[in-house]
Amino acid sequence: MTAHNAPSSAHAPSSPDALTYEQAGVNYDLIDPLKVAAQRAAAATAANLAPHGFTELQASRGESAYVVDVGPFYLASIVECLGSKALVADEMKALTGKSYYDGIAQDTIAMAVNDLITVGATPLVVQAYWAAGGSDWFGDAQRAQALVAGWKRACDTCGVAWGGGETPALAGIVADGRIDLAASCTGIVNPKTRLSVGDQLQAGDAIVLLASSGIHANGLSLARKLVERLPNGYLTEVEPGVSYGEALLAPTVLYSPVTEALFKAGITPRYCANITGHGWRKLMRHPASFTYRFNHVPPVTPVLSFMQQHAKLDDREAYGTLNMGAGFALFVAADQAQRTVEVAQQLGINAWVSGRVEAGPKQVVIEPLGVTFGSDELQLR
């Protein structure tokens, strides 16, 4: 179980007028204990697989996707919601007349697919959950058609079948004129040697970071709150010719083509992390005690740099909250790191050998910034 719009307020604000997640109405310190309690209750249900002749892969508990051993291969599954990014699309439609729901569709699928592939799975089937505040939402043909077209295109990019879905009208639960989007994804780990839950992770491994396209779908509560401080709101320029709203709506990168290409190239990551809520703190998601030391940070995408500046976040707050230019991490054997970068770049996704795994206390050390996150700053289990 993961959340999408709120990293924890695990450290003090950068300055007295810094804009934090708690001020934006979301506090992981309140959310995470429920997630941990739910995971513990869920773990007790694993015995229900036994009558079917299956077993869970216990190491997948607390990871980004759940894995079941069904004999010849592993079955992996995940469900994820988009969060509040659709609200930005709605605001921008009111300002520009354009529909951004083709990109919103990709964001939603990316939330599920990018989590599923962390365990080494090939995505097979996506299901849609589109819950509107009323039937009228579906009556906007431009918006509805954009959502359908974007959903299909993202499925084609990932090589998955769109199996079906649910489109309830939930007046009184979902706000009028709004929609809550979610996706589930099922995949297989085949052959089983593709599994990447960190059991092979070791000191000396390299950490390859894949570029993000922007904010992705995490941090939108903060991004929307920041609009109140901007001179022209969502139409404030982030860079020449690109408004804040447009930059926020850049679709999340779909990383499954990279993991599939790595498999074909004979490279099996030892661990993976989808850098979503909790920012770079997610890089120590693995339960073992390792130090993840980074001597290089990717270029920060303009919209994230803009947010850091205008929300008055120091590097510690920014990197503990947002992806800051790195959307996905691959932990690979050191001698496969450069080839991993080449495979990603051949698919048009920038990548960098940015860090290494070391023996030591569980922490993320970002040397160029002088920032360290300790194990007490990420509680997901």
Image (tube, helix red, strand yellow):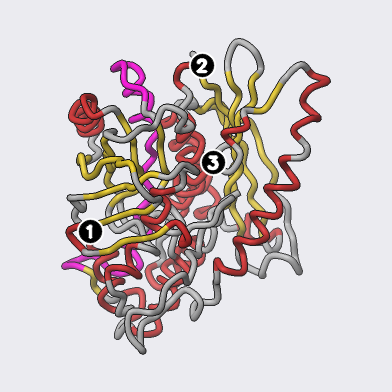
Q: Say if mark 1 contacts mark 2, CB within 8 Å.
A: no
Q: Amino acid at mark 1?
A: Val
What's the CA distance linking mark 2 and mark 3?
Answer: 17 Å
What's the CA distance linking mark 1 and mark 2?
Answer: 36 Å
* Above/below status of 197 relative to 35: above
Q: Secondary structure at mark 3?
A: loop
Horizontal side of 240 relative to 214 (left or right) equals: left
Q: Say if mark 3 contacts mark 1, CB within 8 Å.
A: no
283 or 228: nearer the viewer: 283
Q: Secondary structure at mark 2?
A: helix
Q: Secondary structure at mark 1?
A: loop
Q: Disc 2 or 3, which lies upstream in sequence?
A: 3
Q: Amino acid at mark 2?
A: Lys
Q: Disc 3 or 1, which lies upstream in sequence?
A: 3
**In this figure, which residue is indicated by the disc labeled 2?**
192
Q: Position of residue 209 (x, y in %)?
A: 28, 43
Q: Is residue 255 magenta?
A: yes
